[in-house]
Amino acid sequence: MRKFLYTLGALTLIAIIGGGIGLGVLIYKGHALDVESKAFVDGAVPAIAAAWSKQQFLDRAAPELQGRVKPEELSAVFDRFSRLGSLVEYEGSTGQALLAYFTGSGGTVSASYVAKARCQNGSATLRIGLVKRDGRWMIRDFYVDPAPGGESRRAA
């Protein structure tokens, strides 16, 4: 009985140490993903909003996003965005990355951010969804909410 309890105790200790190490690695990776995704958003928003460039947007868009929006629809949406005028001041973004793992289907890395921008003809809040594939961040969703009381516009 004593040998059994020692073995059980040793296995429990190994499990606790292993879990602690795993949690530490997860926290470290999560922080790194937050830093990466925020840098992506903080580079993408000024590039897109500087002149409301459809091409800058498409260069950063995930393939499924590009596939679900027709070119003429995207042009019309960006024409509406351009009514805000060029970017005057980028006020930064807030958000975080999410790491999810599902048994059998693997893991996904995504992120969700809200960014603020002041343009020539008003301010806007941008809501951006990201996905990371093959080591590259891409835009999954992109919404622009002109302020105040403006109608929300979804790029795709």
Image: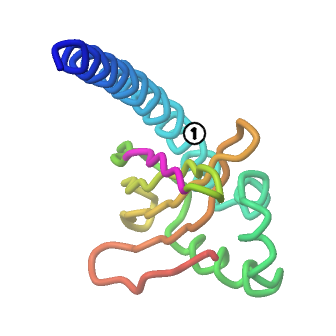
Q: Nearer the viewer, residue 90 or 156?
A: 156
Q: Is residue 116 left or right of residue 37?
A: left
Q: Residue at x 44, y 56 (%)?
A: 112
Q: Nearer the viewer, residue 73 or 94?
A: 94
Q: Which kind of residue does numbered mark 1 sit on?
A: Phe
- Whether residue 117 can be seen here: no
- Whether residue 55 can be seen here: yes
**Where residue 43 appears, x then y in whole percent?**
57, 39
Q: Nearer the viewer, residue 6 or 107?
A: 6
Kindly indicate the quadrant of the structure image that contains residue 123.
bottom left
Colour pattern of the rendering: rainbow
Q: Is residue 117 left or right of residue 10?
A: right
Which residue appears farthest toward the front when viewing the image? 1
**Where residue 154 appears, x then y in whole percent?**
55, 79
The quarter of the image holding the N terminus is top left
Q: Residue at x 59, y 49 (%)?
A: 107
Position above or below: 153 against 96: below
**Where residue 144 appears, x then y in whole percent?**
47, 71
Count of numbered circles on the image: 1
The quarter of the image holding the C terminus is bottom right
Secondary structure type for disc 1: helix
Q: Nearer the viewer, residue 87 or 12?
A: 12
Position above or below: 135 against 52: above
Q: Is residue 24 left or right of residue 110?
A: left
Q: Residue at x 39, y 73 (%)?
A: 146
Position above or below: 96 against 77: above
Chain part drawn in magenta = 96-102
Q: Residues within 10 Å of mark 1 (few under 14, many from 20)?
A: some
Residue matched to label 1? 40
Tell me the chief SS of the magenta region: strand
